[in-house]
Image: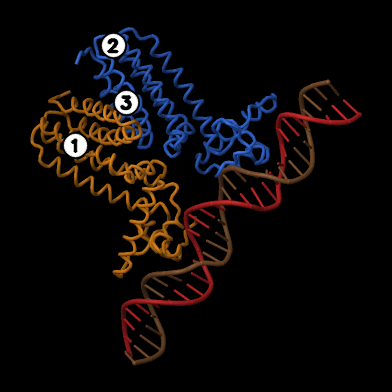
Chain colours: A blue, B orange, C red, D brown
Amino acid sequence: MKSNPATRPIEEEPTLRRTPSQKRSRERVEHILSCATRLIEKKGSDAMRMSEVAEMAGISIGSLYQYFPDKAAIVRTLAERYNAASRDCIASEFAKVTTLAELRSAFSALFDTYYDMFLAEPVMRDIWSAMQADKTLREIELVESRASGQLLADTWARVAPETPREKIENAAFLIMHLGECTMRLAVSVDRPEGDRIVKAYEQMILQEFVADAT
Amino acid sequence: MKSNPATRPIEEEPTLRRTPSQKRSRERVEHILSCATRLIEKKGSDAMRMSEVAEMAGISIGSLYQYFPDKAAIVRTLAERYNAASRDCIASEFAKVTTLAELRSAFSALFDTYYDMFLAEPVMRDIWSAMQADKTLREIELVESRASGQLLADTWARVAPETPREKIENAAFLIMHLGECTMRLAVSVDRPEGDRIVKAYEQMILQEFVADAT
DNA sequence: TGCAAATATGAGAACTGCTCATATTTTTAA
DNA sequence: TTAAAAATATGAGCAGTTCTCATATTTGCA
């Protein structure tokens, strides 16, 4: 596991080992990722073997490691894509908001959409679980929560200027983070209970979005 | 990983492979656990090696596996002890509660205590993180959340009989579970921010404990 | 065409959890 | 006391994994 200092220049462990300069390489990276996705879908990222990824992609293990420095990097790449997609989704939903009431309905809509997405996408779910196991991935998720928390905080502050900014900052981060936790919980129990849990969280949060100068 | 059916009778994979009948064995189990704890404290449960545990305990690997069926079982045992301790703590705190106001202060007190405990006990923190990685451990945590949620629900229903029982059941489980998530978050960021996060969660939850017939 | 850089390869190094045949110790019972 | 039986201890090594690296092949370019 000890990295060889000679082969790695100055910068930290990147997600891609080498930036693919040729088109074929870029396609290959995509192909690797799609094979990995299919394998994760079938057996989970934990049980996915690097040898399987290589075999399914029709390349050697060596080639696989030419692109990804380690197994976690594959999962990380997929996670980052999901993150980017959801951040866009959150940003566009919040952009339309102009009143507290709209913030409430935007939050509800967003949360329901997410829940459906989680239910429909086993790969995303698996990766979200795997994130908890890996330290680097946990940090990525934290950064992500902060980013989406900031999105919420800005919107919230815009539509409720009388609420203290500091309170909003703290709460927004927590609300987004716990939202993810709630998702994870909801999809790990039976369907009707999961639905109730999601609703319960929404109820809890919606009453936070009120005019308040405390 | 395939278990040998001949050596294991009917029951499922137990936490302890054999019930130690001799006193020396029982002491040995304790010794193993205390060594494991020290190692987890030093490097985390993930980096803890079974060979290290055996060496530190002054026994052979074979002996180690005589008592614990696998590495996860050691972590599981420690987790279950922490769980039992905290459940007792929660139960005794809630037992005294007779009014909604008291429920609120009991909840705050409990939550603060937990936070201090988490900050002071790196091993507990590590195990709590490790629980997320392992499927069995995640289930244990869920069972635990349900149990403490039930404790909260019973108390809550007792002091707020007008609140619908169903709403309480759902909320209580979620509140306890998200409480753990908040802890994990709070201890993974810098101290002052962690403090603020804990306070923010308390604030959010305290306003749930109100007379309400919705 | 020829040469250098980029890319591909897969045997196997390194590491780890865990097993099992065997040895030792303890208990039982005669 | 003693011998057989049961419980416990041992560690070499198996099985399974990630990842490396010396070497071969392909590609881009003069």
State the SS at label 2. Answer: helix
Residue at image point 28% right, 48% down: B82
Amino acid marked by disc 3: Leu
Foreground disc of the pair 1, 3: 3
**Residue bearing the label numbered 2:** A101
Q: How far apart are marks 2 and 3 (CA)?
A: 20 Å
The subunit letter for the residue under badge 3 reads A
**Looking at the picture, do discs 2 and 3 lie on one chain?**
yes
Amino acid marked by disc 1: Ala
Q: Position of residue A166 (x, y in %)?
A: 28, 18
Q: Distance between the residues labelled 2 and 1?
A: 31 Å
Q: Does residue C20 lie above or below A58 as drawn?
A: below
Q: Position of residue A89 (x, y in %)?
A: 44, 18
As drawn, the label of residue A174 is 3
Residue at image point 16% right, 28% down: B209
- Residue neighbourhood size for the residue with mark 1, other residues' Cα within 10 Å, grouped as few (<14), some (14–19), many (≥20): many
